[in-house]
Image (spheres, rainbow, N blue to C red):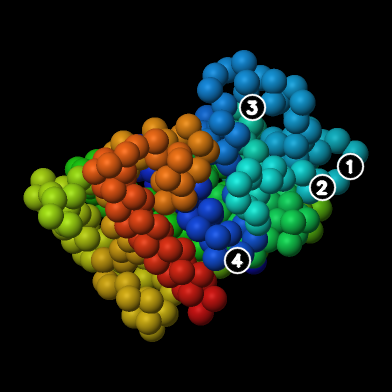
Amino acid sequence: MPKIALFNHKGGVSKTTTVFNVGWMLAEQGHRVLMVDSDPQCNLTGMVLGFKGADELESFYEEQGQNTIRSGLTPAFEAQPRSIEAVEAVQVKGRPGLYLLAGDLRLSEYEVTLGIAQELSAAIQALQNLPGSLVFLIDRTAKEIDADFVLIDMSPGLGPINQNLVMTSDYLILPTSPDVFSVMALDSLSRVLPRWKQWAVQASKLPVLQDAAYPFPQPNLKVLGTVVQKFRPRNGRPATAFQKWIDEAGSTVRSRLRPALEKADLLLPQTVYRSAGVDDTLNLALIADFNSLISRSQEFLTPVFALTVQQLKAVGTVLENSEESRDAFHREFSALASRVARMTAA
C-alpha cells in the first residue's frame, strides 16, 4: 500500500485537483484508494462533498466531527488515555473504491505542538508520541478500507505537518505549473527535500521515538516526478509562452533538483524511470487547463474526464468539442495513473 504525497510549497499548482483526478482514475482502473486531506483549508473535502459555503462545512463537522484527520490525532496531541484508531473514511459518490479521510479546519492548531515535538522530542518525553502519530493514523485508516493506494493532499508551505507527511510517505509527486514562481519552487525544493530527509533519518534513530506508542518510521521516500498543469494548448502543444516555462522547469530539474535528490538517495533506480518513459526532467505528465469543463466538474463533483453527455450540457459543435476535450483528459489521466501504479509497483 504505497503512500504518495502530492506537495509543492508554491500554491495554485493544482495539488488538490491532481489528487482527486488521479485518485478517481486509479479507482476506475480497479484499485481501492484513500485520499487524505491534510490541508486545513479543506479544499479536497469540499471538492468531494460539494460544499458551497461555510454553513455546509459547519454542518459536516457537527455531524462528522469524530471522523476527520484532526479528530483521529486527538489521542496523541491531547494526551488522552486511549490509542489512535482508524477514522471512518467517506465513500466518494459515483466512484466505487475511492474514499476520503476528511480534512479539518482545526488541524493547524496542532502545527506548533508538532514542530516543538519534532525538535525537542529527544529531551521531552511527553512529546514522543506526536511525530509518528500522523503516519500511524493514515496507515490504520487505509488498512480499514483495504486501500491499494493512499494519496495525500497537502497545503502549500514548509511547516512541520508537511515535513512530517512528506518524509513518512513512500513516494512524492511534485505538482507544478508553467510560471517563474514554480521554477523558483523547484530550485528551492532541491535544498528543502534533502534537509528534510536528513532530519527524518536522525529522528528515526532516536530511542525515544523508536520506543513511542507511535514509532517514527525510518524514511523510505522516493520522488516519482513532476506533473505540469494549467497551460493553454495551441495546435495540440503548449502555447509558446507556456512552453518557455515548461522548458525552464525541466532545465531546473535536470541541473538542480535531480542531482540534489540523487545525492540524498531520494530517487528510484534509473531503470524504473526509463521503463516508465520518464526522462531526466522527471516529468510524469503535461496536462492542459480544463477551461470550461471545470465548472461542470465542480457542479457534478466529478473529474472532467468522467463527465457524461448529460452533464456536459451542450449540443452540436460545442458538445463535440467538449467530448473531444473530455476524452483527451481521460487518456492523459489514465496514462498518468498507470505510470504511477507501474513505478510504485517496480
What's the CA distance linking mark 2 and mark 4?
27 Å
* Residue appearing at x 30%, y 53% in the figure: 324
The circle on residue 82 is 1
Q: Nearer the viewer, mark 3 or mark 4?
A: 4
- Element at label 4: loop
Percent from the top left, x then y, of residue 114? 63, 39
Q: Nearer the viewer, residue 73 or 335?
A: 335
In the picture, the disc for residue 106 is 3
Residue receiving disc 2: 85
Q: Looking at the picture, how far across and down is residue 159, in whole percent?
A: 50, 39
How many C-alpha atoms fall within 10 Å of the one at disc 3: few (<14), some, or many (≥20)? some
Specify the amino acid type for callout 4. Answer: Gly
Tell me the amino acid under the disc marked 2. Glu
Badge 1 marks a residue whose secondary structure is loop
Asked if marks 2 and 1 touch (Cβ < 8 Å), the reply is yes
| Residue occupying image coordinates x 34% and y 50% | 323
Residue 98 circle label: none
In the orientation shown, which residue stands out farthest toward the right? 81
Marks 3 and 1, how far apart in space? Answer: 21 Å
Check disc 1 and give the amino acid type.
Arg
336 w.r.t. 70: above or below: below
Q: Is residue 297 left or right of residue 115?
A: left
Residue 118, above or below 139: above
Tag nearer the camera, 2 or 1 = 2
Q: Say which mark, if any, is on residue 30.
A: 4
